[in-house]
Amino acid sequence: MATTADFKNGLVLNMDNQLWQILEFQHVKPGKGPAFVRTKIKNVLSGKIVDKTFNAGIKVETATVDRRDMTYLYNDGTDYVFMDAQDFEQISVPPATVGDGARFLLENMTVQVATHEGSPLYVELPVTVELVVSQTDPGLQGDRSTGGTKPATLETGAEIQVPLFINTGDKLKVDSRDGSYLGRVNS
């Protein structure tokens, strides 16, 4: 249990048998009336974001969420298998839990897996990942970075838009949250 004075970003609350993570909070003391706490919370499983107001001082049930760095091993056909680097324990995570980030998962990549009472809640990839272009149309003379874009297939199978000067075999830095091209990596 925690009171509204214990609120902080990242705290996970257990409300109505659902887990909600606090994204933002603000203590408000109006000139007239009691104080309250305005929050923006996100449903851990569905990703839905809502605004909720709590009266100051009320008790709210918190949930214990264990976040661990784990190494992605392989996809066994149905689930993604991750291994804890500390105790070498392996867990299987369903594709729905991994979400859209699965497009950028490479074997032996370190990610953060959050679990609650032994069941995986979500998988958090690093913000940027470095991937090699496995196929794209060749660039033409005169193509510049300020020009248009073209599709490129990465080594994980994900397809993103890249500038015209990118060639097959180039190593790129990609934002894992939205799949946007961030730049070339000089090896």
Image (cartoon, grey):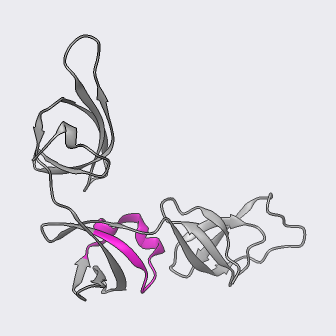
In the rendered image of this protein, does residue 42 appear above or below residue 159? Answer: above
Residue 153 image offset from top left, x and y in percent: 59, 76
Task: Give the extent of the magenta segment.
Answer: 93-113
Q: Closer to the camera, 43 or 33? A: 33
Position of 19 compared to 145: left or right?
A: left
- Residue located at (69% from left, 80% from top): 170
Q: Is residue 96 left or right of residue 148?
A: left
- Foreground residue among 57 and 126: 57
Q: Is residue 130 above or below residue 17?
A: below
Give the left or right position of residue 180, taking residue 17 as reference: right
Q: Nearer the viewer, residue 150 or 83?
A: 83
Residue 25 in the image, given as x and y percentages of width and height: 32, 38
Q: Position of residue 50 (x, y in %)?
A: 30, 38
Query: So how many labels did they put on this image?
Result: 0
Indicate whether residue 135 is drawn in magenta: no
Locate residue 181: give its quadrant: bottom right
Left or right of residue 4, residue 136 in this image = right
**In the figure, residue 86 lies in which quadrant?**
bottom left
Q: Which residue corresponds to the image point at 80% horizontal and 74% vertical from the top-left?
A: 139
Residue at coordinates 90% horizontally, 67% vertically from top-left? 142
Q: Residue at x 59, y 67 (%)?
A: 160
Q: The C terminus appears in which quarter of the rendering?
A: bottom right
Q: Position of residue 172 (x, y in %)?
A: 64, 74
Classify residue 138 by image quadrant.
bottom right
The residue sitting at the right extreme is 142
In magenta stretch: residue 110: yes
Nearest the eye: 49 or 161 = 49
